[in-house]
Image (cartoon, coloured by chain):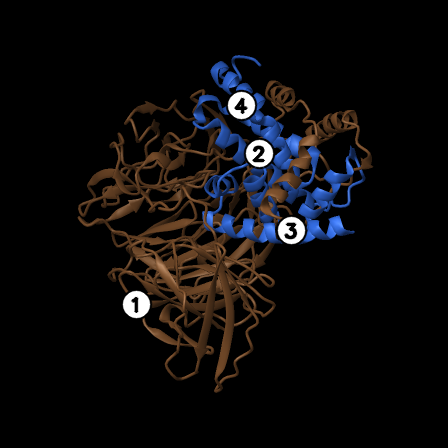
Amino acid sequence: VQDSVVDARNEGDLEQLYRADGERLWRSLVLSFGDPELAADAMAEAFAQALRRGAAIRDLQSWVWKAAYRIAAGEKHREARVRVSGREPTVEMQESIVDLLRALGRLTPKQRASVVLADYAGYSHREVAAVLGTSVATVAVHVHNARRQMRGMLEVDEDA
Amino acid sequence: MRMRELREQLRRVDELRMPDVWSEARRRVVSSGLREDPLRDGPSSVRRGAAALVALVVFAAGGTLLWRAIQPAPDLRGPSPSPEPATDALSELAPGWTQLAPPPDYRCCAGTAWTGSELLVWSGYTYTGYSNEVAKRDGFRFDPISGRTTPMALSPLGPRSAPASAWTGRELLVWGGQDPGGPPYYDDGAAYDPATDTWRLLPPSPLSARVPLSVWTGFEWILWGTAVRRDDRPLDGAAYDPANNTWRSIAPGPIELTDATATWTGTEMIVFGAALHGGNQPESPTAIAAAYDPRADTWRTLPPSPLDTNSNTAVWNGSELVALDYNHASAAYDPRTDMWLDLGRVPGDDCEGGLSGSVAIDGDVLAIDCGEGLLFRKGSDGWVDVTPADGIFGFAFLPLATTQPMSAALAFGIGADFDPFGLVAYRPPSDDRADEDIEPVVIESTRPRVEPGTQGSSSFHASYRGMTIPLDAIETPGAELEYPVTESPVALPAGTPIVIQGRFRNAAIFELRHARGTYVEHGSCIVPGALDRISAGDGLSAFFIYAEWADASAGVAFRARVEGSSVVTPSPEVTQSGIDATLFGLVICDG
């Protein structure tokens, strides 16, 4: 990337972050928003904007996660407002993952993001709250309710 | 299925192979394709590129089923699509008040922005109190932590007072304004890039010269109406898109305002205030408001607020519009219920005209009224006086335009003789339990309805960290409440959220905190006075829980919002001492 566009040191740090943490972020976004395309788009946008901002970002990992989730939520919001729902099938995916995403899709958006960040990404409730821009108590409740509902849904699915 | 099994289920997603997102990010930077017009319908080209990228990888992974995009219920109250810096220099300050380095100049009514590390100040004037002020043409960037000042390049705009301003994450936008004493008004604008120390003129807007209200949405800068008293009160507005350097006219607003504030909720711009004549005569009994949706280009009128028309201010705390007036009344508007909730009296001495303004700090709201600092913590039922022990007099808020939630409020200190005496920051108290994951108390109930004039009993079964908490509360309207002490009271950390599960209408979640004020009857039970005006209905309900605190024996009460059968507006911790409580009983009060 051109030197005039990004700070080289920042780019190196960001690439290291991408190599170390990128897959966890992308898969968390897939679980949270149920859409691999949207996850890739939001993540690319977050990294692109981080490259633009350079040294102004103090905590790259925290910034990128927060930005990716906000961009993805915004895109989801935009899709809802312009009635993009019901898109045609796009890519193939294994049955077990489709079932998992279908179960997660029955949660509210905040429950889904909270439980994914806590139980898949391994973040503490405090860290989840920072990513989602909400309180620790809110996260605790969303995680609790999400676990309870997921338990019921997945048990039903497995029994079926 | 146990928790370990849920985590294993989530691990199924590890079978997916991630596309080369890094190359796509680099490509976007080089091509400056950060974001296409977000208002355009249909998928963006970058989105289509991402789709192709993902399709290729997933096919390569050997999928067996056709993937259908799962479309969960949209979160219509989601955050702004534009990313926001996760940290700013103010987040490293200690909670409470902090004296910062003195800025080179103290200006009223400048174009300002907080970038996350620097304060940008352009034009405005030095307040003398004698109406002889002259606007300044220059500006500066100021780092309040190090005290470093950097002069701005000279703007192509003329000097002025009260230009509308916004921070896009990259540029300071300024437009309009007036001379320090009033007209003439201005109708031009410019953008300042601190990275290059350069200005660029904005194209001509469709708006007439004025001092408009404005909000930054994450994509557009919306300017509307007027923020100052004038005979003609324009109802038109326009939105500037910095990505395309274009303006668009917006639908005209439904109400006239002159003394008002504008705030962005994530989906709407809410303008709140009143239309006043020069002699302070209002044209409405109370302060009024309207909301503009930029995606639909439509307005809606909000119900009249219970607040005074004179000297009021409002700010969005992430879920409610928190407003107060110079009579020390306060109220919150919730777009989900389209209702105003009375927040009770704001503490402090009466001093007409002393309301300086309010700002949101990570969901909390700080107001400066008559030189006193007042804090409203998100989800709480009242204001807390946070004025430092050595007192403040005449604090004037530095109006800040920023794209990010502030982690601290910035304020210029203005003395009794209009002498500047410093730049200060305020951060709300931190969460003492922030390093621990909070486990909620879960209460299941099949509460029978209690008819007025009859005695009813409520049966609750609670659990906390695997422990069972038997709860039985007996309420007798008109008589003293009876709270049978549970046989095994459980110590709960302050701030513990509580989930009530059941199919009755008033299921809710709330947190333990101290109650304040007198107790009054509310519906079928008795709650602290601060809750006596909670409206009936499916949205808001009062909840009362009896708890024993280490330093007091008192009930604690809550207001919570019902969404379906389990809900939720959890309150941030607000306790006087941060101590733990012991849970004894619970009463749910129908509104």
Give the mark, 4 or 3, whose residue is nearer the N terminus.
4
Chain A drawn in what color?
blue
Which element type, helix, strand or loop, lies under badge 4? helix
Pointer 4 with pointer 3, Cβ within 8 A: no
Question: Which-is-in-front pick, marks 3 and 2?
Answer: 3
Q: Amino acid at mark 2?
A: Ala
The residues tagged by marks 3 and 1 sit, at their Cα atoms, a distance apart of 39 Å
Residue located beneath label 4 in the image: A17
Callout 2 and callout 1 share a chain? no
Chain B drawn in what color?
brown
- Chain bearing tag 2 is A
Q: Amino acid at mark 1?
A: Ser
- Chain bearing tag 1 is B
The residues tagged by marks 4 and 1 sit, at their Cα atoms, a distance apart of 51 Å
Q: Is residue B284 left or right of residue A78?
A: left
The residues tagged by marks 3 and 2 sit, at their Cα atoms, a distance apart of 28 Å
The residues tagged by marks 4 and 3 sit, at their Cα atoms, a distance apart of 33 Å
Q: Which mark is residue A68?
A: 2
Give the mark, 2 or 4, whose residue is nearer the N terminus.
4
Residue located beneath label 3 in the image: A151
Residue located beneath label 1 in the image: B553
Which element type, helix, strand or loop, lies under badge 1? strand
Q: Amino acid at mark 4?
A: Leu
Foreground of the two, B543 or B101: B543
